[in-house]
Image (cartoon, grey):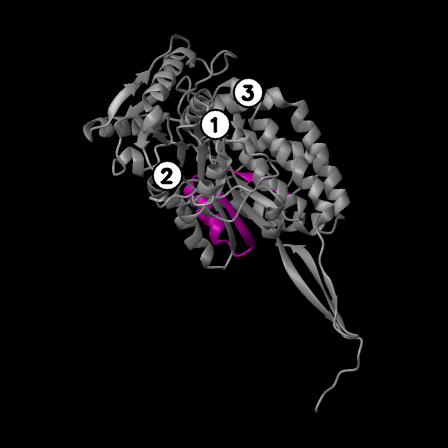
Amino acid sequence: MLLKNFVDGQALSNTSGKTFPVINPATGQVIYQVEVADDSVKQAAIDSARRGFKIWSTKSSMERSRILLKAVELLRQRNDELAKIEVLDTGKPWQEASVVDVVTGADAIEFFAGLAPSIEGDQQDLGGDFYYTRREPVGICAGIGAWNYPLQIACWKSAPALACGNSMIFKASEETPHGAVKLAQIFSEAGVPAGVFNVIHGDGELGEWLTRHHDIAKVSFTGEVDTGRKVMAAAAGTLKQVTMELGGKSPLIIFADADLDEAVSAAMLANFYTQGEICTNGTRVFVHDDIRQEFLQRLITRTKKNIVVGDPLNPNTNFGALISAKHQQLVLGYIETAKQQGATLACGGSALKPQSAENGYFVEPTIFTDCHDDMDIIREEIFGPVMSVLSFTDEAEVIRRANDTHFGLAAGIFTLDIRRAHRVIHQLQAGICWINAYGNSPAQMPVGGYKMSGIGRENGAETLLQYTQIKSVYVGLNKIESPY
């Protein structure tokens, strides 16, 4: 299969003939080729987005809402088809993709479609004269996606942008580009005008071109911190608005009074779901000394017994392959470094070759104990199935240690003491927090990070403010008083 760029409502061939391969992480085999967005495609995308914006921004909010809701209907009808694409591209289990990736993406579009007619300004009487404000779309937006939740991220970025009347050029990750093209096709089928949502393919240079282009008014980026710095620096040249959801090294704090089975479930979800490739994962698990041994016993038993590794398309598989051979080696390198730095390997730690997917990029679910705060596995984002268990005795101590990081994306705590729950969560320096839960991210809830974990928010009504700009209009009803 040859996947082309999607511009102006249709597939568009490049003139250079350049392509790149996409590999199924579970097999190591090339599954299709993708056409690179060359100069001709890039210019066509800009021209198309300009035209699309003029048409889309003049439609009523109710009309935009109806069209987006049609796209939601199509996404839900094609859930299984789209979920399979995500499994083949990412290596994640069908068990996850079939109930999360498409579902939550459709939820975001549905949520913002519902909010579109509520976008409004204010008015104030000034004693005869008055002023009013309008919330207007910003223009052409660029979305730059990540490879771990490709379709969901494309939905999360396009939903508020389109609901507010903007157009978007979306650069899918070169490792997982298929889902975004399918979304573009669904938007077109639903009635979104040509040029409103375009998908182009390429590497970091293409992303840099988007962030520097003078016609693009806003960039929304999901990815690692170092790339986020480059995006922000490039966007500064034209004073673009920027939203960035970056990396994390999130703490999960388990107090002595926690429901232990629930806490173990959360720790496993926060480290092994999507084989650990989630920005918000709670990879620093702080466990109170009083329950540490019992927690570890239950955790290790369930990890060895309940995790099923293999062909991600098998509905029984609940643990998939890492995105690439390079990333597999990166994760294995962190595991070796942790051993050298004195951490105790309690579970896992090796590459895997399951019989049903022998050539895939698998790493065992891995648990380290006897960790201390200055180890590499505690300080740096691994983005793989590596859990670090740390001990604590004092509330103030664990809050200080949890906050001792330049990241601030997420945090979670488990306790049955409601006063402690809110007291502690209010002191954690993170933008997304959970109490007696982990990982839940409904479309209604804003998500984003503190510190080096990002700028701005995705999802939630808050996001509408980031895809609109305010215009103040002063209306003079009184005669002008002038000394001239």
The magenta span reads 196-221
Q: Which of marks 3 and 1 is nearer the N terminus?
A: 1
Q: Which amino acid does label 3 sit on?
A: Lys
How many residues crowd mark 3 within 10 Å: few (<14), some (14–19), many (20+)? some
Q: Which of 348 and 326 is in front in this view?
A: 348
Q: Which of marks 1 and 2 is nearer the N terminus?
A: 1
Q: Which of marks 2 and 3 is nearer the N terminus?
A: 3
**Total numbered circles:** 3
Q: In which quarter of the image is residue 290?
A: top left
How many residues crowd mark 1 within 10 Å: few (<14), some (14–19), many (20+)? some
Tell me, for residue 395, which label it has, or none. 2
* Residue 28 x/y as whole percent: 39, 19
Q: What residue type is labelled 1?
A: Gln
Q: In which quarter of the image is the C terminus?
A: bottom right
Q: Nearer the viewer, residue 349 or 344?
A: 344
Q: How far apart are marks 3 and 1 (CA)?
A: 18 Å
